[in-house]
Image (cartoon, rainbow, N blue to C red):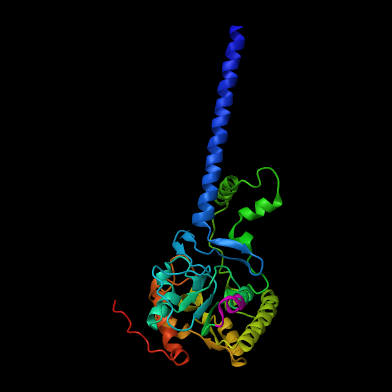
Amino acid sequence: MKQNHGGYRVAGRLALVAASIVVTLGAMEFGVRFVLAHYLNPFEPDATVGYRLKANFSGRYPWVPVRTDDHGFRVPTAQPPASKGTILFVGDSVTFGFGILADDSYPTLFAKRIGRAGDVMNAAVPGYNLGQVIGTIQRFVQEHGRPELVIYGLCLNDISAAEHPSNYEDIDPHAIRSRQGGLLSSSMLLSVLSRRMQKLSAPAAAGPPDNKESLLKDFSAPEIRTQLAGFAREWSELERVQQTTGVPIAVVVLPFRQQIEQHPDWQAPQEYMRQKCAATDLRCLDPWEMLREHRTEELYTATSSMHFSPGGSRLLADWLAESLRDTLNTPLARRPTR
């Protein structure tokens, strides 16, 4: 009988340990879900453009504070009321201001430069290509009416991404595991741990050659032809949007760091865009020359080949305000001293 009582005690202790583990894992799962959903993931699926920013989000992405308004547009620390018509910025992570505060992004600095901080809306979303940008413009017109002006920050990888728009799974890899099904496929905790293990086990990069060369240097490369055809179709659709809505669209052709700091002869995209712009009513603006004049300054964030630093964003905002002076017909605010 004593041995049986001892067995019961061992079994009870094991059951208690198992229950404690289950409760602990459950609490961790809940915590991971809460943090990712409400603090570290500003995105949500969207049937029209794949995904969009959540409305009224306040958290971080990836580790930089990000806040959105009722419409899911990124907003700076202080957003005064609108005073005139809306100036709508669209694009991808470069225009969004990836890796820097919203206050340091070029749309926000542009708004201050022209003295219309409440009129500028930043509807850019990281990962978007031109097709998704067009969907954003059309949705804005349907839901909010015609803006005064649309400014599209065309990052040059929009050309190569024309046939491959990002989807929600690219932003939230956990969604892939969940849809695939299987044991514990719905566990977000396991998803985070598995992604972490994959990063730790991945071989270190050994300094591969620049993979942007075919895009930036040589548009005759076979691997870019399909993307060029797709971009041409999207470009034609952007022209149609301007014609049907009556909203002027300005396209800012944003160069890569490599073109400014290392390879000024890599201007295949600029030449391609010059040809596209010469045959369109869309207004195109290329800050390449201006940025080259400041190439010794820190124009881009430390680890990025395309995302502007606060200093680079300020230069771009000032240049853009001057370039659009005639379009906006707005006196420029005095540039703050630094």
The image quadrant where one finds the C terminus is bottom left
Tell me which residue sits at (57%, 18%) in the image.
Answer: 10
Where residue 99 appears, as percent x and y from the top left, is 46, 65
- Return the residue found at the far top: 1
Q: Identify which residue, 15 or 259, lies in the foreground.
A: 15
Q: Residue 290: give x, y in percent of width and height.
A: 43, 84
The answer to whether 28 is drawn above or below residue 81 in the figure is: above
Along the line of sight, the residue nearer the viewer: 56 or 23:
56
In this rendering, position of residue 210 left or right of residue 82: right
What secondary structure is the stretch in magenta mostly built from?
helix
Q: Is residue 73 visible to the viewer in this orientation of the structure?
A: yes
**62 and 229: which one is in front?**
62
> In the rendered view, would you say 102 is above or below 337?
above
Specify the quadrant of the image occupied by residue 309. Answer: bottom left
Q: Is residue 281 magenta?
A: no
Across and down, in percent, residue 49 comes to 64, 69
The tally of labels here is: 0
Q: Quadrant of the N terminus?
A: top right
Picture coordinates of residue 327, whole percent (x, y)? 48, 91
Q: Which residues are magenta?
A: 138-146
Residue at position x 64%, y 47% in the image: 186
Occupied quadrant, residue 281: bottom right
Q: Is residue 237 left or right of residue 72?
A: right
